Amino acid sequence: MENSMAPHTYTDCQIENVSVIDVRIPTSDTLLGSDPFHKKPNYSAVLTTIETNTGHKGISVAFTAGAGNDWIAYGVKDLAQLVSGMDVNTFIEDPGGFHRLLIDHHQLRWLADGVSRMAIGSIVNAMWDLWAKLVEKPLWKLLVDLSPEEIVKCIDWRYLRDALTPDEALEILRTHYDTRESREKALCQKGPKAYSTAGWLGLTDEQIIETVNEVKAAGLDCFKMKVGQDLEFDKKRLAFIREAIGDDARLMVDANQVWGIDEAIAHMEALAEFRPTWIEEPTARDDVLGFVKIAHALEKHGIGVAAGEQVPSPVIFKQLITSGAIQYCQIDATRLGGVNDVLAVILMAAKYNVPVCPHGGGIGLCNMIQHYAMWDQICVAAHSDTQVVEYLNFLQDDVFIQPIQVSNGAYVVPTVPGWGLEMYPDFVEKHIYPTGSIWRGREESGSIMFLA
């Protein structure tokens, strides 16, 4: 197989500058994004741009719910010192080594996962975007065209070998490698199947129905609702939603970690009559044993457990996947340490037959996760029978120059090079926190002092 990791044409391409911008949107005004814990979130993103001396730019976003966005921005600025002046070939020839340079820094490693890993992922994801633009391919196509050996070299295997060895990963990838072109052609025609998060907790029934009807018009037949605030409220809302979407539509529910273990089981047994496909984040993000207990209890009701948007490392994913704690793997584009981490999780999920149903939402997440869904369904799971990809119908058209699109119930496959995260300069300028015009005179409502 050809080696696409060492293009010698980029030897004079060096990282010249890394810019980091704190962008916040006052979604707390509309309650879009609201759930039991995040009652009035301000959807926000750390916008990272890596610029080279050749005029190329690699872009990434790291999504947050507002306050704390500046914590990640500081981390990215600090890490930028490690890559400033670096030859881009250093990354392209060994993405795995680049990833370990940041993940294993002998002082920063003490900070563990969470904000630290998200900051690292910002740099890593921007580098992958830069590489994809240099070869003029969408990110998904760059991944699809890499050989199995190149993919495996990207991954840090130290803590994963007990669940998936590099040889097993190679076997998964090689099994599907020679037939990937036919799947790529088919998936480019129909796109990865999408589902809509329509039922934000703070919205009225009328607002939810408006969203449901809008996405139904685009062909979607899978819907997710927020639950967990009050059982009787949840019953009434799910009855209302089930009637609106019909008996044949797929319905998922999401508690955003609001329950304890036994509480989650009791609440979901009471909601089983509405036939939810999964309960997402029923309890604390890192309680693997708790997820196992919930999954076993709900199995007889045909309800699966989904999680991943706040899982902070591939190691926790390993435990969730291998223990049977989750039946749906929701990789997130910016929670982990970038592309390298996510590749590992998708491969582990394939070995244990856990469908990868990426977490979207936020600002920029849907734009990124479609690329992972494409790679998974072409090269790893190598089918589209069980996967759905989260879709939100806001913060797109007026934000991104190349917004995501859905048609016939699926994502329209992106064709622009890289992630496709370029934002309109005017939008960025207005939403820079705290100096943008959107925030003038109301700075506190975007800060840690804003209490719901």
Image (spheres, rainbow, N blue to C red):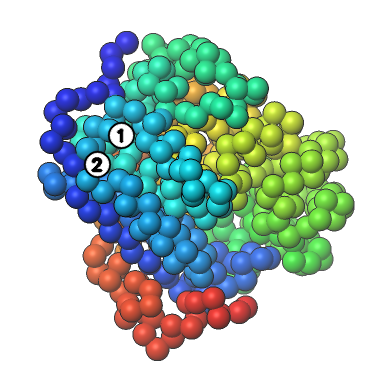
| Occupied quadrant, residue 125 | top left
Q: Nearer the viewer, mark 1 or mark 2?
A: 2
Q: Quadrant of the C terminus?
A: bottom right
The residue located at (54%, 41%) in the rendering is: 331
- Inspect the image, locate mark 2, and give the three-letter code of the amino acid beneath it: Met
Marks 1 and 2, how far apart at CA? 9 Å
Residue 314 in view (yes/no): yes
Q: In percent of the image, x 30 and y 34: which residue is there?
A: 91
Residue underneath mark 2: 86
Relative image position of residue 173 (x, y in whole percent): 47, 17
As shown in the figure, which amino acid type bears the numbered disc 1? Phe
- Looking at the picture, how far across and down is residue 215, in whole percent? 49, 53
Q: Residue at x 34, y 23 (%)?
A: 146
Residue 180 on image: x %, y %: 39, 18
Which mark, by number, is residue 404? none
Q: Is residue 97 left or right of residue 159?
A: left
Q: Report if residue 247 is visible in the image.
A: no
Q: Residues within 10 Å of mark 1 (few under 14, many from 20)?
A: many
Number of on-image labels:
2
Name the one closer to the observer, 252 or 244: 252
Residue extending farthest bottom: 441
Residue under numbered circle 1: 91
Q: Are marks 1 and 2 in contact (CB under 8 Å)?
A: yes
Determine whether 336 is above or below 324 in the image.
below
Q: Determine whether 412 is above or below 363 in the image.
A: above
- Foreground: 117 or 243? 117
Compared across the picture, whether 419 is left or right of 8 comes to right
- Which of pointers 1 and 2 lies earlier in the amino acid sequence? 2
Asked if residue 422 lies left or right of residue 265, the reply is left
| Callout 1: SS | helix
